[in-house]
Image (cartoon, grey):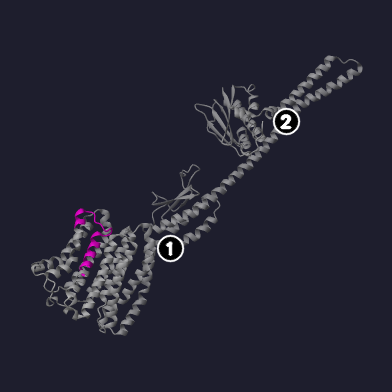
Amino acid sequence: MPATLAPIGAASLLYVVVVRGFVESAADHGLGWPLLGVLPTFVFGIWLLTVSPSRSAVFIAAAATAMAVGSAYETFVQRNIGLTQEPWFPLFNMVGLTADAASTAAFLTMFATYPTGTPERRWQRLAVPLLWVPVLVGPLTLATTPHVVMQQYIGINGEGIPNQFAVPWLEWAAAPVYYLIYQPWPAVLIGLGVLYSRALFGDADVRSRMRVMTWVVTAALASFVVWTVAPPNWPTAVAVFASLIAVPLASVHGIFRYGAFNIAADDRGRMVARSSDLLITVLYAIGTATPAVLLASNLTATGAVLLTTVLAVCLLPLRGRLQRWIHRAVFGDRDRQLALLSELGSRLEQSVEPGELLTRLAVAVRDGLDASWVRIFLAGPDGTLAGSPMGVAGEAAGNPVESCVLVQADEALGRIEVGPRRRGEYSDAERTLLRTVAGQAAASVANVRLSARLARQLNDLTESRERLVAAQDDERKRLERDLHDGIQQNVVAQIAGLRLARNRLQRGGLTPDELAGLQDQARETLSDLRELAHGIHPPVLSDNGLVAAIESGVAKFPIPLTVKADDGVRAERFPEEVETTAYYVVREALANTAKHANATLASVGLVRSNGHLQIAISDDGCGIGSLVPATRGGLANIRDRVAALRGSVDVSANEPSGTTVLVELPVEGQGERSG
């Protein structure tokens, strides 16, 4: 469609400007209508046709093109009066009649169906096709009227020009055709009826979208009526031209406001910004040339050039302001947005703690979007948002009007919530900016969270090592105490007994019973040494494996204890460090059960699954109550031992009572031993 209408309209306007502005030597060349009335509408219509698929765009482009063709027809006939005497002129006259009728019909249809191209009520949709009936004026007058029917503004009386194509037996229809088809008022009344019924009695959404265009149409109608019935004067001409220029401006307002002409929200900025400079340039040229065109009969050539130059300079600030307004409407306040993006990086780089980073981010977003308030929530490990925000800028009140999730590698880190804008509403460009900022900030939030997590892990590791060292010191002191108070005393007693036995042997008084007593003392010392070594590393663990080592202590446990493991786990030999850690974890957990749980039953279950050895130590005791992470004691020792092998510990309550300690130790890739 643009490839057809654009060259036709452009060629028609070029012909009019060349003939009236350069070929004609008269000062009153009559360029006001083609340049101030037709040109802006034509430029906007063709531009709109390139960016919009709606029928309304076709209507306004067709109307503007028909206006240009009508102006070219008028110019051609007025400069070639002799053509009216040619026998084929009645056929040629159909061009002018059809162009004027098509222009009126297209404008009325666009106004009546604005902004989607389709009215809402059924009777309105049935009335719209009637607006195109005047387009038949050319063939109908050619067939019914014995003379040529011409538009009055051409200045030629067609009653004196015979129409040899008229059909005699259809002459009775000449009067109805003249009053119903040639005169535009029936179609105008139908079009205005549809327009005002929608604007006044349509749904609230329809009335809101049509408000500005309805006022523009009303002003244009009033100015055209005055122009038609009143004597020619420049205020009326200015009003007519201004009303025509207001049609593109009202349409642009509709595009920005609610997507008129079916221009999608995501495409408005790109499409409108791409062509806005051209539209502004045309309007600037029109505003610069208007006074000289309207006052052409009263100005010399030098005066017209001087007036045009002065206006061009004076209107430059207005042109720049209009460009900034359109770009701000499309993209938002670019200066503020660029400042936000440029400052955001430095603000985030200076933050080393999540609370500080999120507060600075909230301040930057509030200043960049001109928001009344901004608050930022962080998500927990399970993805749920925290109950209170960690970053706040402004007095947060009420529900947010915009929000954006902070996402890093498909993980939801948090959410930015934005309150109402201080002035106006958020544009599509500002929503896009919010998503851009969220994407940029997500990486910083993830890095800060990771740094904080690593710091906590480093602190936990340091504390764990300190606890391991302390536990080793305690174990060494216990061994020293056991050796000093037990075995060492037994050895000292045996040495003293052997000295006495040697003295009695020298005197001949040593008896076999005394040697048997010394032998029994040596056996007791050996038994004590074995018990001590068994506590350090039981031989059964090295000889028969983990399950056998755990089962070896069942008989000595003060409450009934069962050990559950399938044949595969019983037969498998795990890495030495895994077996040692698992053995002491079970012993430590069972010791806690015996001391604190008041249990009547306990069990140990061992399962190999997904490259891990899972150990569950359960009892039916009093339970853990409100679990507080221990920094010393049995549970801390268990966590430290398991963490050293990169395993995990989970302590949970049983139903209806009791506690389960679930330990998982990785066994894949640790050099498993063969049995």
Give residue 565's quadrant in the image: top right
Q: Position of residue 138 (x, y in %)?
A: 17, 69
Quadrant position of the C terminus in the picture: top right
Question: Is residue 120 on the magenta stretch?
Answer: yes
Q: Which residues are magenta?
A: 100-126
Looking at the rendered structure, the secondary structure element under dot 2 is helix
Which amino acid, mark 2? Leu
Quadrant position of the N terminus in the picture: bottom left
Q: Is residue 435 visible?
A: yes
Give residue 289's quadrant in the image: bottom left
**Within 10 angstroms of label 1, few (less than 14), some, or many (20 or more) residues?**
some
Marks 1 and 2, how far apart at CA: 75 Å
Residue 432 falls left or right of residue 539: left
Q: Residue 479's mark?
A: 2
Q: Is residue 503 above or below residue 109?
A: above
Q: Residue at x 62, y 22 (%)?
A: 558
Q: How many marks?
A: 2
Front residue of 573/442: it is: 573
Residue 471 falls left or right of residue 602: right
Give residue 517's quadrant in the image: top right
- Precedes in sequence: disc 1 or disc 2: 1
Residue farthest along the right direction in this orientation = 507
Q: Position of residue 536 (x, y in %)?
A: 70, 30
Instruction: Check disc 1 and report the residue beneath it.
Output: 334
Question: Is residue 520 on the magenta stretch?
Answer: no
Looking at the rendered structure, the secondary structure element under dot 1 is helix
Q: Residue at x 87, y 16 (%)?
A: 510
Magenta stretch, main secondary structure, is: helix
Q: Position of residue 8 (x, y in %)?
A: 29, 71
Q: Is residue 427 visible?
A: no
